[in-house]
Image (cartoon, rainbow, N blue to C red):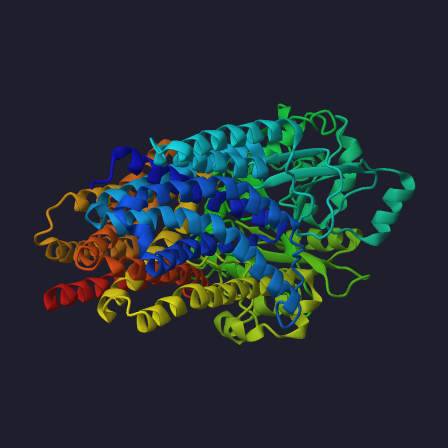
Amino acid sequence: MQLERHQLLGVSLTSMSALALEIVLTRIFSVTMWYHFAFLAISLALMGSATAGVVLYFFPVLARPERARRWVGLAALALAVLIPITFILYLQVPFHVALGRRGFQREQILWLALIYLDLTVPFFLSGLVLSLTLSVWPEQAGSIYWADLTGASVGCLFSILVLNALGGAGAILAVGVVAALAGLVLTWRIGRQQIAAVIAVLALSGLVWGNARHELITITANKAGGEEAPRLYERWNAHSRVTVYDIASYPFFWSVDLDHWNRIIQEGRFLNHALLLIDAGAGTPIQEFRGLLHETEFLRYDLTSFAYHLVDQPRTLVIGPGGGRDVLAALASGAPHVTAVEVNPAVVEAVQGPFADFAGHLYERPDVHIAVDDARGYINRSPESYDIIQASLIDTWAAGGSGAFALSENSLYTVEAFQTYYEHLTDRGILSISRWYLPGHPAETLRLVSTGMEGWARAGVADPGQDPGQHVAVTARFDPADESEGMATALFKRAAFTSEDVEAMQVQAEALGFVVLYAPTLPPQDVVGEFIAAENQDAFVDAYPLDISPATDDRPFFFNLVRFGDFLSPDLYASGVYQTSVEALLILAGVICVTTVMAILFVILPLGLGSRRRGLPRPSARLGAYFGLLGTAFMLVEIPIVQRLTVYLGRPVYSLAVVLFSLLIFSGLGSLWIGRRSDQGRPLRLGRLFPALAAFVLVHAIGIPSLLDKTLGWPLSARMITTVLLMAPLGFLMGTPFPTGLRWAGTRDRGVVSWLWGINGVTSVMGSALSVAMAIHVGLQATLLVATALYGLAGVLLARETRSA
């Protein structure tokens, strides 16, 4: 009995709902728990699918052709119903991240395990649909895998649309509608099941409509802890959730001298602000503005505005303007024109929409140009040069639109980014970047300085006779009320700082209550000054207890400052800034541990014990290793490429829409192509394809970065086309090994298909975690090189297995 076309459509819709659910959950986890938990969604999806294979292994009666159609339809219907139910149950779990020095508390582990079990259910059901079809019709594995990957690629685009249109909870319900449609297709001409599917489609569609009008399902708690306050504004998109809660009647400063603060309060020389939060964590103020620039002069007292005291009438570019505070500071300092580049459209929509009057229509002023774009790509493509480029505390603490496969990457703080900034400064131009400063261990400031100096050196200021240290100055302010916190502003000037510049810097710093930690000709202060003045900075970096090495595009994890050996250092838990870096890795380790335990309990042990006690078939060691290598290698290719091309395409949502979509759609085409070849000689044919696959992965590891760098200035449409062309051959070849191996094994012994499906799912989970860990510690290129080796080894194993058979 052949698989019919409408059943392939049902498989495709099921896969579409599963991947869309995975992406939507990354957004929701970023709000309700922490952005590091975005990795959990990947684990849930892969583990649920692997567990479905185990169930079929123990209940082969489900895979009998005469029953399979009914069970596939029931699984799709159950998926549609349980997507909203499991999500509502998840919202009731009182899980709050509060890591101590030993990581998760026992109660937190239990709640996390409960969340894992709850949200794995939908992915188990979607995996059951796919594994059932593969088990019953292994000879059509290529077509089934093509339908699966094609549906997943469409799910990428669908998740973006529903997040923008319906928000987090609404997107979950919309995914349920897609799953119900899959159930309707898969139950075609099956009596009562088809009636139930129609009811499910209508009911879930009604819930989507009702939730859009009345918020039937809402997120009432977030990662900050406790119940959320009433919201003045809320907007979801593929980047983040943006919320505004209240208008604050006091001035907003990142870092200001207390004497100036008291004087401003006493004299009432300030305007109110509304705090806009990104994923309930990172804040940016929407500054009240009444159209009178002299009323905003108090903004010049902030440490983040220090550069404006050194340059008259600067033509300015602000990176990440958020609610517009830095734009106003530039205008109040005499800037004739300000260009502001904000990556998140929801932030700009808030300032230009419901808060337009409050913000004085700032972004509509003729002397302000607001661009919704990735700042680095925008600057690279711009023909303009600027007197000041400013970036103040740019970090969103939000899962990236590409699925948040990494933890703390940011392409704005890499050596290559600093080279771009240097090339777009005027001769008197200054790059001003403000970051948090922890007295005693100012690793974030040190890494900022080391990255900036390396960028300046590569841009040419390290030529004979030039010293990058002559182009750097660092000013800081320490909080007398909290000795564990502070802030620093690092200034990188295109030309060397002159003695007049340093004198003006000293005068202004003293007047504003700041400390100059380093400037040319001045005695260096604190460890930051010692580092810049050190004769051997490489030795200083190696000896420092935290990771302050320059961040690069190959290792863009600027905020990951903690080495594994530093987890238990009590100094790191004295500051929320550094604790976040520790928590990122602890959370990753915790999620991996929970995933590993679940894999052992629900996949490895059942398969192993079942094959022994019940005499069930099991694959050879070589065949099992082959499918394990495929699962690991696929993730070791997918995740680094998505991360790398996020920089190239400019906005994370483009990486999601173009990179992941292209990779999946072409992998599906590869599966369809290989599935239509005759059985005779197929493993041999695949053996010839493996060297080509390994070669393409190798090209992406070594050759593609230079191509991306040379074409970064192209228009977005040209870069998208380039991305698709790069993904086409790689994705096509990556789609051939799995269905071919599965068909070859399944036609010889159908009982081993569940084993192979489970092995591939478990190793995919481990591969995604391994990919993140490797990218952080050895870089994206090294991760791809390891993937090349794994694909080569898989080809060798398959060749030996087919020859022995």
- Left or right of 743, for residue 309: right
Where residue 144 sits, quadrant-wise, is top left
Look at the picture and state if 433 lies above or below 209.
Answer: below
Count of marks overlaid on the render:
0
Where residue 663 sits, quadrant-wise, is top left
Along the line of sight, the residue nearer the viewer: 567 or 304: 567
- Residue 469 location, x and y as percent? 55, 61
- Which quarter of the rendering shows the C terminus? bottom left
- Left or right of 718, for residue 330: right
Look at the picture and state if 304 lies above or below 758.
Answer: above
- Which quarter of the rendering shows the N terminus? top left
Along the line of sight, the residue nearer the viewer: 627 or 216: 216
Along the line of sight, the residue nearer the viewer: 140 or 153: 140
Identify the residue shown where x is 50% and y is 46%.
421
- Residue 503 location, x and y as percent? 69, 54
User: Can the viewer see residue 488 in this picture?
Assistant: yes
- Residue 291 location, x and y as percent? 75, 25
